[in-house]
Image (cartoon, grey):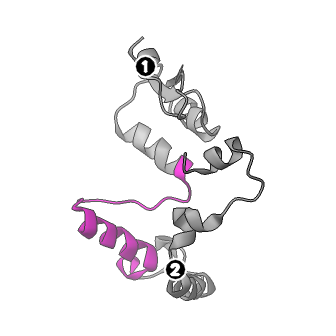
Amino acid sequence: MDSVVGDLAKGKEALDPKKYMFAKTDFSGDKARINEILDSGVLFRYHHADPANIPVAQAEADFCEKFGFKYALACNSASSGLLLSLLACGLQDGDHVLMPAFTFVAVPSTIVLSGAKPVLVEIDENYGVCVDHLEE
């Protein structure tokens, strides 16, 4: 197991961050750009006369171009993105949405907020959805 969970299971006290993807990427150039955007105060499309010319709109356009999508919408959080996805797929009040039993509280919360009902699916030893329980 080459993971944080694996290291913990092996009793390692100090985890080596160099093993994980976030530590392998050089964000030094991005930090300056992020600080520039934060310092500008133009954090979303409401703050500029030309909404297509702000960083978040440019990031959405770049995402669409890179992945071949027609639309992209930047959100303030993954929870907001999950809620918008649930609403966009046409859920009706009371519909059931399957979700892993081992997850962050935002997952069932957004399902409930969408009007649907979360249905917990057991996980396997790798923390993935248990296929047998999913079929049930």
For this rendering, which residue is in front, 36 or 49?
36
Amino acid at pointer 1: Leu
Residue type for callout 2: Asp
Residue at the spot of label 2: 26
User: How many numbered discs?
Assistant: 2
Q: Which of marks 2 and 1 is in front?
A: 2
Q: Is 43 on the left-hand or right-hand side of 61?
A: right
Between the C-alphas of marks 2 and 1, the distance is 39 Å
Residue 44, compared with residue 107, is above or below; it is below
x, y percent for residue 60: 36, 68
Q: Which mark is residue 134?
A: 1
Residue placed at 73% from the left, 51% from the top? 12
**Mark nearer the N terminus (2 vs 1):** 2
Q: Residue at x 50, y 29 (%)?
A: 99
> In percent of the image, x 42 and y 38: which residue is there?
87
Residue 18 x, y percent position in the rendering: 59, 68
- Does residue 102 appear left or right of residue 85 in this picture? right
Which portion, as a residue range, is magenta? 50-79
User: Toward the viewer: 102 or 96?
Assistant: 102
